[in-house]
Amino acid sequence: MKTWNPAPVPTLPGHAERPRIFDDSRLEKVQLPAGGDRASLYSCGITPYDATHIGHAFTYLVADTLQRVWRDAGLEVVTAMNSTDVDDPLLERAKRDGVDWRELAASQHELFRDDMSALRILPPDSWVAVTDHIQPAAEAVAKLLETGAAYRLDGDVYFDSRASDELGALSQTDRETMLALSAERGGDPDRAGKRDPLDPKLWHGPVDGEPSWSTVLGEGRPGWHIECTVIARDTLGLPFTATLGGIDLKFPHQEFQAQHAHALGQPFSDARLCAGAVAYEGAKMSKSLGNLVKVSELLSDGVDPAAIRLALLGHAWHEDWEWTDAELVDAQERLARWREWARLAPSNEGYTDGDTVMDWLRVTLGDDLNTPAAIQAVDHAVASFRADSLAVDAIDALLGIDLR
Ligand SMILES: [Zn+2]
């Protein structure tokens, strides 16, 4: 799909070290990538309805920051993302609102592009709609049926969890928790006839009134996890460096993405990154609760997108946190201070202080993308030193905040 135009990223002198990032499958910080000169990232994209709330924006800002840090480390960076543009919740929403599901998805994609662009989030190299990638997904499911890693059940196809390599190990989840999360997050553990309650659906057989495609498997559409497995494989090649999603994707989605790839004969990603959940008014921001703070609504209220970005950067990427209006006010004030500091910058001489800001940003972000510490470093510089153009470039290149 068409993405959005990337904001320019200044190139800084020299290179940072490659970063150490918290990997949710090892539960520790690891150097990413471990070797080679290429870094690749797959981000699970939106289901296009109720775009783009602050929780989404937080996750894609993590992808953006990681890309900036990788580029600054001199790595070749390749990124991909999907859009789950055919899925039960989307179809239900379209039906509720009396709109065509394709029109709903298209309008939400447009909104998402505008929001990402306003927040200066770097676009993925490939943004692939599931509806544009049905045949490869069907072929992958056919292969799993052939090898015995999948089975048919009344027109649907399920993954046989017994084909998994230590199910739950990647997401550090025990069986009882997996059963509960499966029921909560799109699975159907109670369906009769499954070999294991945890087996996820690889293929939805045709249902009257719902979209379906004609494929090697017959009519139908792919399941949630296999879509991402196949899109990541076809855009990045396997294995790639890291997969990223919100913490609620840790199980079952990230677990089964990897298990499907394994059953197809290849390892999936070296690391699994789970961005923290964002709450609002005391509960996790969610479509079901309706407590969504949307980027487009803040923008139409006249909020500076750079202030939204700065407020999001104020939180460690891996932790859960709560959005408050007070925080946005703080970010607006900080942005005004930083801009005033940058405005007084001499054109481009005397890089001495600028080297310091750039080095501080490289050190803080290289340690698990510690954006709160990076912000403190800039605050300290703003309070203590004169700005120069390299400092301003470093803040733009690494934090994506353009102070000019
Ligand atoms: Zn995904």
Image: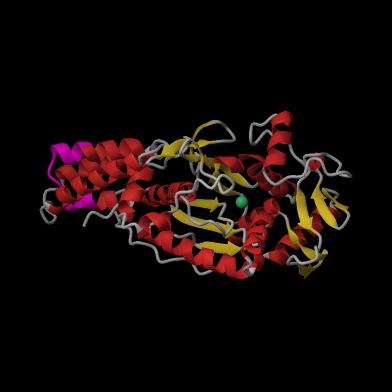
Q: Is residue 382 visible?
A: yes
Tell me where residue 258 sits by quadrant: top right
Q: Position of residue 301 (x, y in %)?
A: 34, 57
In reply to whether residue 384 is colored magenta, the answer given is: yes
Where does the C terminus fall, quadrant-wise? bottom left
Residue plotted at (44% across, 66% down): 4
Q: Position of residue 176 (x, y in %)?
A: 73, 29
Q: Which residues are magenta?
A: 380-392
Q: Is residue 230 visible?
A: no
In which quadrant will I find the N terminus?
bottom right
Callout count: 0
Work out whether residue 211 or residue 173 is closer to the camera in this orientation and state it. 211
Q: Was residue 348 drawn as part of the magenta stretch in this picture?
A: no
Residue found at x 55% / y 45%: 286
- Looking at the image, residue 330 sits to the left or right of residue 315; the answer is left
User: Is residue 306 or residue 7 the one in the foreground?
Assistant: 306
- Magenta residues: mostly which secondary structure? helix
Tell me if residue 79 comes above or below residue 356 in the rendering.
Answer: below
Relative horizontal placement of residue 129, taking residue 78 as reference (left or right): right
Q: Residue at x 42, y 64 (%)?
A: 114
